[in-house]
Amino acid sequence: HGNNKVTDIYTSAWNATTIYKADGTQSVTHYSTACTVYKWTTSTKSNYTVTINSATGGTLTVKDYDNNTVSNGANKVKLTVLKFSASPSTGYSLSSVQINNGSTTTTIAAADISSQTYTLTSNVTITPIWTPAEYTIKYNNLKGATHTNPATYTINSATITFTAPTSKPAGYTFANWSPASIATGSTGNKTVT
């Protein structure tokens, strides 16, 4: 009955009816079915606030079970089912979604984001956890030379300026790296020669 609730119950039952034979002995007793009447009145379900924290790394979309988008600060009734989808920005991936109800935190792993839901029973704060993707740096044509330059970087890494090798093969001198650096904010695996 939607938002309705039972406020009163009325029950009535018929008296048993006994039929007697002509000699006065009992033949059969008939019992009628009891009847219960429910009185319904409208009640208001509790509303809870859904706070959605934004964070660098992408966009988290929250929807209710009817596929309506739930905005930050929205009020939703108790037992509303929330579902999630994520759109990572370039250079990031979703690690998890954390849902805090003021006393406990529920964590939904990125791998479960499309299948796991959350049912409201209180105010909640939802926070997506984005992780910078790690890219590799490959060094070509070393000819046995060694160096101390990094093997990986992320979109948040400071600009990397490659330093000269710490050793060089016999008969060679070091000229330069190409490219000479990787700027902060870059993405993708890189090859340096």
Image (cartoon, rainbow, N blue to C red):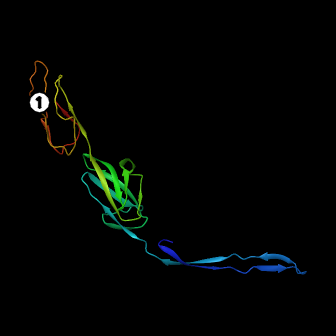
In the image, 106: left or right of 173? right
Outermost residue toward the front?
Answer: 103
State which quadrant residue 127 falls in: bottom left
Residue at left offset 38%, top offset 52%: 108
Task: Please tell me whether residue 168 is drawn above or below residue 125 in the rendered image.
Answer: above
State the image coordinates of residue 97 (x, y, percent, origin top left).
Answer: 34, 53
Residue kind at label 1, given as amino acid type: Ala
In the image, 60: left or right of 155? right
Question: Where does label 1 land, which residue?
Answer: 164
Task: Please tell me whether residue 64 is drawn above or below residue 89 in the rendered image.
Answer: below
Image quarter hosting the C terminus: top left
Residue at left offset 18%, top offset 22%: 144
State which quadrant residue 91 falls in: top left
The number of discs equals: 1
Outermost residue toward the top?
Answer: 171
State which quadrant residue 184 falls in: top left
Residue in the foreground of this view, choosing between 97 and 189:
97
Looking at the rendered structure, the secondary structure element under dot 1 is loop
Task: Please tell me whether residue 85 is drawn above or below residue 5 in the rendered image.
Answer: above
Outermost residue toward the right?
Answer: 23
Residue at left offset 10%, top offset 30%: 176
State the image coordinates of residue 57 (x, y, percent, origin top left).
Answer: 25, 51
Neighbours of disc 1 within 10 Å: few (<14), some (14-19), many (20+): some
